[in-house]
Image (cartoon, helix red, strand yellow):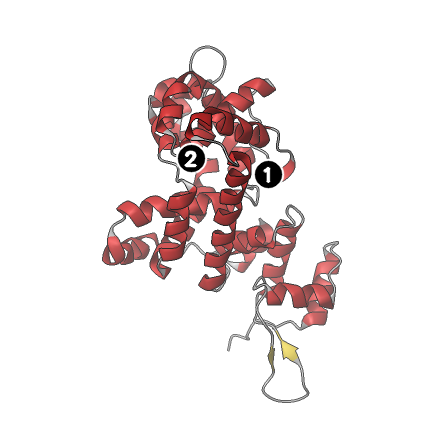
Amino acid sequence: MKSEPPRPDSAALIDAAAARGHEVTARSLELWRYKGLLPRPRRQPSGRAVWLYPAGTDDRLFRLLHWRERTRNLDEVLLALWVEGFEIELDRVRAALARFVDRWSEMIEVEIGGASEEDGAAVVDALARRVARMRGERSLPRVSRMRLSERERACGYLVAAMLGMEDELAKREADLPHLERLVGLRRGHDGGLAAVLGSDVRSQAASLPTPARATEAVRGASPHELEYVRRILRLLLMVLPVAVPTLFADHAAKAIGAVEFARRFLADPPPGLFPFMLTALLVPLREDGPGEEGLSTHLETLGSTSLSASQSAGR
C-alpha cells in the first residue's frame, strides 16, 4: 500500500527553508497564510494537538521564496504562484489583478493631471520617460544596444498603444522600429525578424488593452475565463523559450535578439510580467472570446498545466 506524502508543520517548513539558505519565521508564515500565498494548516484528527499543512506545501514555500527574492509586491508573488499551478482562491486573484489595473490608472492620472486632449503627446512622453528609466525587475528587457532616447521613443509608441491613442500612434509610426529593437525583433539595418513578421508587431501593439477595458475585464471575468488565461500564460512561458529558436531556425541570424528575449524575459520572467500578461490575455478573451461553452471545450483540450511538485521545486 502506497504511503501518503508527509504533511509538514510550521517548524518543518521553517527548517526546510533554512536548509536552502532562507530565513523564515513563524510570523512570516502567518503573513503569507493571511495573504493567501500559503494554505492554512489543519489540526490532525487524533493524537496530540498538531497543526499540519497539506502535502506539498514545502514545494509551494520554495517557489514563494523564489519570487519573494525578486519582488516586494505580494500581489505579484500570488499571481506568479497561481500561474505556476498552485491553488489560489480566485477572489484573491481577481483582487490582485484589480489592484494592478488601479495602480496603472493612478500612474496615468498623476501624469495627465489637468492636461487637455491637445497635451496628449506630452502625457505619452512623460509616461514613456518613466517606463524607459525603470531599473531592476520592473525594467523592460535589454536585449539590444539602444540609446536612452531610443528606448524612450520605443516606450512612447507602447504607451500610446496602451492608452488607445490612435492619432498619437499614427504620429509615432517612425518609432515602431525602436519598439521592435527593444523586444529583440530588429537588429542592425536589415530589419531582423520584424521584416519576416511584417505588420504583426504593429497590430499586436495596437491591440494592447487600455486601463478602462482592463478594469471591465477583470471585474467581469468568470472562473472559466480566469482559468483559461492562467493555462495559456503558463503554456506560453513553458513553450516559447524552447520554441523560438526552432520556429526561426531558418532565420537564425535575424532571430538572435528574439531568442535572447525569450531566454531572459520568458524562461524565468520578472514577477511584474504576470499581472500585465494576464490582463492582456483576459481583455480580448472577454471581448471576442468563444463564450462559456466554447471555453469549456478549450479547457478540456488544454488539459491541466499545473506544475508537479518536482517541477516546481526544481525550476
Instruction: Single out the residue that lies furthest toward the bottom.
Output: 47
Q: Is residue 21 above or below residue 172?
A: below
Q: Which residue is mark 1?
A: 138
User: Residue at horizontal 59%, vertical 34%?
Assistant: 139
In the rendered image, residue 299, in percent from the top left (x then y), is placed at 32, 56
Report if the CB atoms under discs 2 and 1 are less than 8 Å apart.
no
In the rendered image, residue 268, in percent from the top left (x then y), is placed at 56, 42
- Of marks 2 and 1, the one in the foreground: 2
Quarter assignment of residue 19: bottom right
Quarter assignment of residue 63: bottom right
Estimate how packed mark 1 is, as few (under 14), some (14 to 19) or many (20 or more) residues with alpha carbons within 10 Å.
some
User: Residue at horizontal 73%, vertical 55%?
Assistant: 22
User: Residue at horizontal 46%, vertical 63%?
Assistant: 91
Q: Is residue 308 above or below residue 178?
A: below
Whether residue 309 is visible to the viewer of this picture, yes or no, is yes
In the rendered image, residue 264, in percent from the top left (x then y), is placed at 56, 34
User: Residue at horizontal 59%, vertical 72%?
Assistant: 40
Of residues 284 and 230, the one drawn nearer to the viewer in this rendering: 284
In the rendered image, residue 224, in percent from the top left (x then y), is placed at 34, 59
Amino acid type, label 2 = Leu
| Dot 2: element | loop
Q: Which mark is residue 163?
A: 2
Locate residue 291 relative to residue 303 in the image: left or right: left
Amino acid type, label 1 = Arg
Task: Using the numbered discs, state the Cα–Cα distance from disc 2 to disc 1 in whole angstroms.
Answer: 19 Å
Of residues 177 and 255, the one drawn nearer to the viewer in this rendering: 177
Sooner in the amino-acid sequence: mark 2 or mark 1? 1
Locate residue 243 relative to residue 291 in the image: left or right: right
| Dot 1: element | helix
Q: Is residue 37 above or below residue 156?
A: below
